[in-house]
Amino acid sequence: MIQVAAKSYSGSRISFSNGWIFNPVQDLLLFIAPFFITAFVELRFHVFSKEVFLPTVASVIGFMNMVHLGVTGYAAVDRYQTRPKLRVIILGLPVVVLLVGGFLFQKVSHQSLYVVLAYYAFLHVSKQQYGWLRISRRVAKEPDATAWIDTGVLFTLVMFPIIWWHSPLTTMGRAYSNPNDLYFNVTAAFALACQKIHWGIIFLYLLYSGVQALRGTPLNLSKYVVFFSTFLVFYGSIVVVGIFWFWWFCISVAHDPPYLSYVKRNAFGSLAKRSRNATNPIFRMLTSGTTAYLVSAVLIGCVLNWGQGDMVTGWMSRNFLPLFWYTILCHYALDSVVWRRPSPSASSSSHRSIATS
C-alpha cells in the first residue's frame, strides 16, 4: 500500500484528511486532467466526431490496451510463483476470448461483439474507480461503517449515464449507427426521472459531507477527486458530449495511466526481482509484454482478415478491428484474474483493491 500517513489539516472548524492515492498534483493530473485535455482536443480539432480520424483514435486506444495488457502479463509472473493453477487459467484466457469473440463477430453479428465490448468497458472501468475509492478511504483511515454510502454514490455516478445512453435522448450514436441496436432501451420519461434522482443523490451526498465536516469529520479530498473523475468519464462524455469515440478515449486515458502508475510504484520492484529469477520461458514471454496475446491478435487481424466490420471502412475494418477487440477483451479478462487475490510480494490491501480493475 502507498505509505502515506493519514493526517488532518485543521482550519477553524473543517479539517482535511490526507487520503491521496499518489499525491495531490499527481491525482489531479491522472484522474481529472485527461477529460479536459480530451475535451479541448475535440473542441479544437473535432478528432472524435470525424470519421477520417477514427483509425488514429482507435489505434491510440488499442496501443494503450496493449501496454496495459503487457503490464498485467508482467504482474502475472508474480502470481505463478505461488499459484500454479493460475498458469493454466491465464494461458487459456486468450483461447477462450478468441473463441467467444470470434463466434460473436463471425457467426452472430458484429454488433453483438461491440455491445459486449461496451458493457464490459462499463463494468471494468467502474470496478477500477471503486478500487481507487477503496484505496483512498483506506489511506485516510475512514471507518468501514460509512463505506456503503460512498459505494452507493459511485454506483449512481456510473448507472445514470448508462440509462441515458439507452434512451432516445442520447446523442452517442452508439458507434453502431442504429440507435436501436442495443439489447434494451428505456423511454425518455424514465431517463429524465433517473436524471432527477441522480442529481438528488449527488446533492444529498454533498449536504451530508458538509454536515459531517462541520461536525469535525475530516474531508478526504482525494475521494472527491475519484468521484469527480467518475462523473466526468461517464456523465461528461456520455450525457454532455455524447460522442462514442470521445467516451471510449476518455475511459481509456482515465483507466490506463493511473493503473500503470500505480502498478509501477507499488508492484514492479518485487516483480522485477522475481521475473529475473524465473527460468520458465513462459514467464519470460509474459514478462516481455504478453507476446502470445499480441501475436495472436495480429495474426487474426492481418492474416485471417476476419474484419469486414461496419464500424468504419478501409484498412481498419479489414485488419485492425479484430486486433482492437481482441486486445481489449484480453486486457479485461486478464485483469479480472491476475489481481483477484493479493500477492505475497506486495501489500495485501493494495492488491486487493487493485483487483477491482
Image (cartoon, helix red, strand yellow):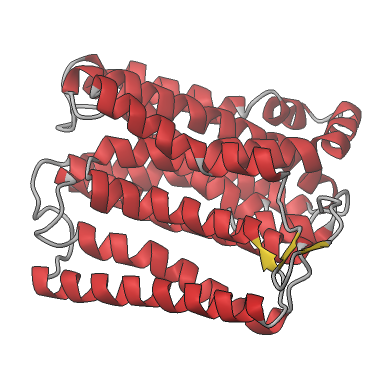
- Find residue 27 and report its image quarter: top right
Tell me if 211 is positioned left or right of 319 in this view: right
Tell me if 291 is positioned left or right of 172 in this view: right
Foreground residue among 84 and 244: 244
The residue at the far front in this view is 12
Count of number-bearing discs: 0
Foreground residue among 218 and 73: 218
Residue 205 percent across, percent down from the top left = 48, 76
Tell me if 33 is positioned left or right of 310 in this view: right
Residue 315 percent across, percent down from the top left = 24, 14
Where 150 sits versus 123, above or below?
below
Where 77 sits versus 282, above or below?
below
- Find residue 224 and report its image quarter: bottom right
Foreground residue among 32 and 215: 215
Where 257 sits versus 8, above or below?
above
Where 74 sits versus 336, above or below?
above
Task: Name the residue: 55% across, 44% down.
Answer: 31
Task: Name the residue: 74% across, 78% down.
Answer: 143
Task: Name the residue: 91% across, 30% down.
Answer: 277
Tell me if 114 is positioned left or right of 180 in this view: right
Residue 73 percent across, percent down from the top left = 66, 36
Residue 110 percent across, percent down from the top left = 20, 41
Question: Is residue 321 in view?
Answer: yes
Question: Is residue 94 in view?
Answer: no
Task: Name the residue: 72% across, 40% down.
Answer: 263
